[in-house]
Image (cartoon, helix red, strand yellow):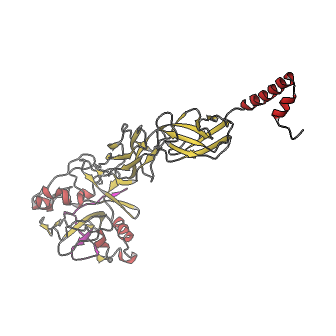
Amino acid sequence: MSGLNSNKMSGNLGISSKLLLMSLLTGMAFFSSCKEDPTLAVLNTEPASEITVSTAKLEGVITDDGGATVTVRGFCWGSVTNPTVQDDFKPAGTGPGTFSATIENLQPNIQYYARAYAENSVGIAYGNEIVFVTSTAAPAVTTIAVTNITASMAVSGGNITYDGGGSITARGVCWSTSPEPDLSDSFTSDGTGSASFPSTMTNLTPATTYFVRAYAKNSSWTVYGEQLSFTTKLADAEGNLYNTVKIGNQVWMTENLRVTKLNDNTLIPEVTDNTPWIGTTAPAYCWYNNDITYKPTYGALYNWYAVTSGKLCPTGWHVPTDNEFSTLEQSLGMAADQLDLWGFRGTDQGTRLKNTTGWDDGGNGTNSSGFSALPGGYRFGADGEFYLLTTITYWWTSSEHDADRGWYRRLDSSSTAVYRASTLKKGGKYVRCVKN
């Protein structure tokens, strides 16, 4: 039986048997042709998560592999709708099921379109499209140098060099007497947008050191520029402005007083002639050589009676005593046993008090103290004449030596030390105020 072929078999069968055999053979061919061919995979793209300035996490789910092995799967994205693997893409394994990947190198504040993809032997299938927007980056701002400083205001500002990929929604400066000021301190609001902007700080306290930083905000960030510092000026009764400096625990004017009235608005007489000058026992002032052009550089010369009015300095300030000058000198390194001596005392304290320019005969100082002393000369109490401009300078103290004389300090171009003595109250000398 095994040696018979189908033709031989059919020859020995009847017609009905032949029909049955043909039917069976036809059915077998029919069932064989019903097997389905593979198709594209079916998949979904889930919403993006963990979105930052430059990254986002994407997730996909392959719900049907299409009857063929998924050999590649992943994500594609771009800033235009319906991205494909011809755009940016990132593979994320093989096979069916859930898969994810974090895409990188995105730009801030950009709307992106993304789709999951899966490839089998039939081709590449894409999931539904999702949309997400990256976060804005931190903007960048620099602080503009402080200018136009007065006793109560100053001007700074900022320069926004990068907006972080989003609109600048607020900008200005913030300031405080403590370092690292922020928006919990005093601040200005100077509009929106990028580029450079000025900013005016107001209601400041005179002769006070402030710290200032520019700031800029976008939808995600608040950033600050570098910190700068400045010191407001001191104003006298006439509105003349003075720089100040802290030396040790004292705060001093760095310029000579040039006011012509007391802080109660009483005018101080200007006495130019020699005889009235040496004859008066009332407050008086003058300019060196009676030339007002010396006012901005050297200030005014006062007799000791103006000093002891108690109203010469701005409110909250006073003419220093002999002991307060000694405190200044000691803070600059003068030995304690030198302080009460007459004549030149100390070592280099005079050099540290002198300005770096303006002194003759090589007498300029280092000004390491910030005191900025200049050689304005003096008016002699015995004859009322003016002497030694660019060579010497004197300052009154408020301390009396005796009925005719008051204590002073002196610097000479030829000495690095500080001179202490007393002289006639009728002399004309400069005044430096110290803070109460």
Q: Tell me where residue 90 appears, x and y as whole percent.
A: 56, 46
Pick the residue in front: 21 or 84: 21
Specify whether residue 1 is painted magenta.
no
Can residue 189 be seen here? The reply is: yes
Q: In which quarter of the image is residue 380?
A: bottom left
Camera-side residue: 249 or 127? 127
Q: Position of residue 274 (x, y in %)?
A: 10, 62
Q: Position of residue 158 (x, y in %)?
A: 35, 46
Q: Give the range drawn in magenta.
A: 408-436
Which image quarter holds the C terminus?
Answer: bottom left
User: What residue do we see at 58% from left, 32% from top?
Assistant: 128
Question: Image check: 192 left or right of 136?
Answer: left
Question: Farthest residue in the right direction?
Answer: 1
Counting from the top left corner in percent of width and height, residue 262 is at 25, 50
The image quadrant that residue 103 belongs to is top right
**Residue 421 falls inside the magenta stretch:** yes
Q: Is residue 380 above or below residue 82?
A: below
- Does residue 201 appear in the picture of this structure? no
Q: Quadrant of the N terminus?
A: top right
Figure label count: 0
Q: Which of 201 and 167 is in front in this view?
A: 167
